Image: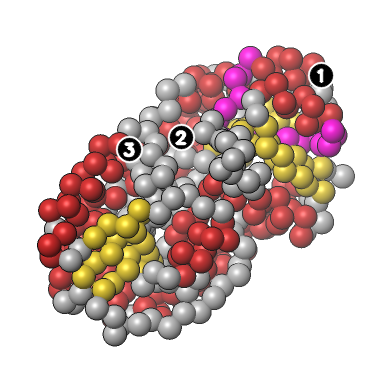
Amino acid sequence: MKKVLFILKRRDDYGAEKHSHVGLSTGLYNSANFMNEMLRDVGVESNLEVAIDNNCIDRLVTKHKPTHVIIEALWVVPTKFSVLQKLHPDVKWIIRLHSEMPFIAGEGNAIDWIGDYADFKNIIIGVNAPRMLRETKLFLETKNPEKDWSEKVIYLPNFYPQEYKTKKFNKNKDVIDIGCFGAVRPLKNHLLQAFGAIEFADSIGKKLRFHVNAGRIEMQGGPVLNNLKGLFQHLYDRGHEMINHQWTPREQFLELCSTMDIGMQVSFSETFNIVGADLISQGVPLVGTSEEIPWAVNAFCADPTNSASICEKLALTYRMPWINVKSNQWSLTHYTNETRKIWTKYFK
């Protein structure tokens, strides 16, 4: 019987006075926890642990005695597996990637590490997006054309719990609350989404409250946040404003999502987009990016390079919020049902 252990790395900015155990690694923690709970539901023994660094892994594996260890994201130095494989020769290690290639390009050692991982006998590369799966296989097949990589690189997509709420859309407010949540970084495309949201708010004669998570600045996201602040400072007299929210535990974040009128995730690069799923789960309609969010309904998705397209899809969503929510919830359910089948087939 297979026994799974998920291991995440604790965030570097962790402070006991500010964070709970569950709030350590935000989206990545939630993603792994959804997977962990899903495996338990289908009868696979599974556990999740948060490690301080590489040196915790041996202790955690010894504690749980798993057959498979899933390392969530790229944080374990490849040379560490020379030691770990000797200590735990029967364990299969899965390094699970959470990013598409455009995002990976901003992580300095990612490709080098993936190439090094592939040289170890008991290491498997798990990928949560079809394009990244293809590109990772292409890289490794080019690196060593003589080797069969079919079982070395596997597809393990994201899961999301199918717990949905309904919400009545209120068009009688003087303001429109639009949530563009997630870590502030260039590929999240916050600035252009703000332009689209401003144009849309003006078109319906409302003031815009543009909600962001300014507490998480990643991958040179500082200039993005500065430009957002500059934009709304100049529009303050028009009544449009940006509202910053600090990162919160999941339950509080879902409550925040439920207060939005519309959610936006018109990103340049995604593999799943948990933030978008959180908004949809609370009955909040979503404008996303069809090529990047695999479950998002195309009719309500915008061109991430065109603020006019973003404005147009916001207007469509405003006219048909119920259809947006229900169709996206249906599509998300279909996607996650397929995810459950894939994980169950591999681990059970």
Report the side of 337 relative to 4 (left or right): left
Q: Which residue is mark 1?
A: 87
* Relative to 57, residue 101 above or below: below
Q: Secondary structure at mark 3?
A: loop
The numbered disc on residue 273 is: none
Residue at which label 3 appears: 221
> Upstream in the sequence, badge 1 or badge 2?
1
- As shown in the figure, which amino acid type bears the numbered disc 3? Gly
Q: Which residue is mark 2?
A: 135
Mark 1 residue type = Leu
Image position of 142 with respect to 17: above or below: above
Q: Is residue 256 something that shows in the picture? A: yes
Name the residue: 68% across, 27% down.
123
User: Where are the magenta residues, as a range?
Assistant: 63-79
Q: Residue at x 31, y 40 (%)?
A: 186
Residue 26 drawn above or below residue 332: above
